[in-house]
Amino acid sequence: MFKILFSSVGRRVALLELFRKAAKELDVDVKIIAADMVPAWSPACQVADVIYEVPKCTSVDFVPKMLAICRKHNVNLIIPTIDTELLIYAENRHLFAQIGTEIHVGDRQFVAIARDKEATFRILKDNNIPVPASWNVSDLEKMKKIPFPLLMKPKDGSCSKGISIISSIVELYERIDNKGEEWLLQELCSGQEYTVNCFYDRDGTCVASIPHFRKFVRDGEVCFAETERVPEFTAIANKFSHVFKDIRGVICFQGFKRDDGNVKVFEINGRFGGGYPICDYAGGTFARWILQELLGETPDYNDNWVEGIRMLRYDAAVFTKVSK
């Protein structure tokens, strides 16, 4: 039996179920262990086999707690699900490896770049990957004319939190003064927004990249989406193999495509994206490939996914009885 621990699992019910589905197809038993800060209020914890309450990932107690869980259950694999825990796992991978637990996360350098939006912009631009024009606050202070309006976002933000449109220098400094954060400012991009789910094999080769355009997004997570082949995004996914050393497993990146076909990339996430279910349904069966790797089999990688698959998410509920 394989034991898979989903970290900071929150609402990722569909992700857990897709791993169960992949295990059933491969005729292997899998135990799903879920960890969250408040399991009683996590829908995904209610559908897991075993649940644990854990501290915030930035707490000094987080890694020891996760190690203890992995030792107790002989966990084979940890799947991180939120951005803030990725660097912590990347830096402590060796501790988990010592007890036989693998973590599905990229190397520290890649994760650090993906977590810093300015660093992402710099390395992509240096490698001739199209990106939105971007500035930090000190860059703007040197400019005679600032091209307002601009998109302002925290350099280490996620889930669209903290993003706003700034239309004047007054708004800019009000925002800076009110928040003790580092900021990146970018041009407002036109066109349709996309997420591209990618899988890289153990050699760092991109074996599949599945774009979907984001028709409707709520709180940073896609609700309505449709898969579409975009050769420009495929080329960028393949180029990442050369830009980032030791890239492997699941990542996703986001960008815009204009009506003339030109694209720009503005963000990389080194984890399963919230829109992964549409990727899996279309044929990008990343969960299956991960389990095949754990089995020591050669995964049946392919890029034969179906274009035109539409995902229309709706609210569903998990019901529990509270003990008093």
Image (spheres, rainbow, N blue to C red):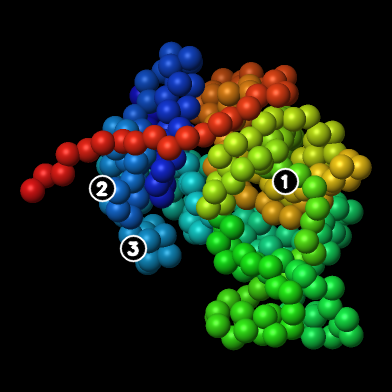
Asked which secondary structure carries label 1, the reply is strand
Nearest to the observer: residue 33 or residue 99: 33
Residue at the extreme front of the image, as rendered: 167
Residue at the extreme left of the image, as rendered: 324
Instruction: Decide which of tag 1 and tag 2 comes sooner along the chain.
Output: 2
Residue at the extreme right of the image, as rendered: 260
Q: Position of residue 217 (x, y in %)?
A: 59, 46
Provide the residue designation for mark 3: 61
Nearest to the observer: residue 15 or residue 108: 15
Q: Between marks 1 and 2, how big is the CA–CA gap?
A: 34 Å
Above or below for 35 versus 276: below
Q: Position of residue 240 (x, y in %)?
A: 77, 45
x 77%, y 70%: residue = 149
In the rendered structure, find residue 193 and report the number of the disc placed on it. 1
Provide the residue designation for mark 2: 40
> Is residue 313 toward the left or the right of residue 40 in the image?
right
Q: Position of residue 192 (x, y in %)?
A: 76, 44
Type of residue at label 1? Glu
Q: How many residues crowd mark 2 within 10 Å: few (<14), some (14–19), many (20+)?
A: some
Instruction: Decide which of tag 2 and tag 3 comes sooner along the chain.
Output: 2
x 56%, y 31%: residue = 312
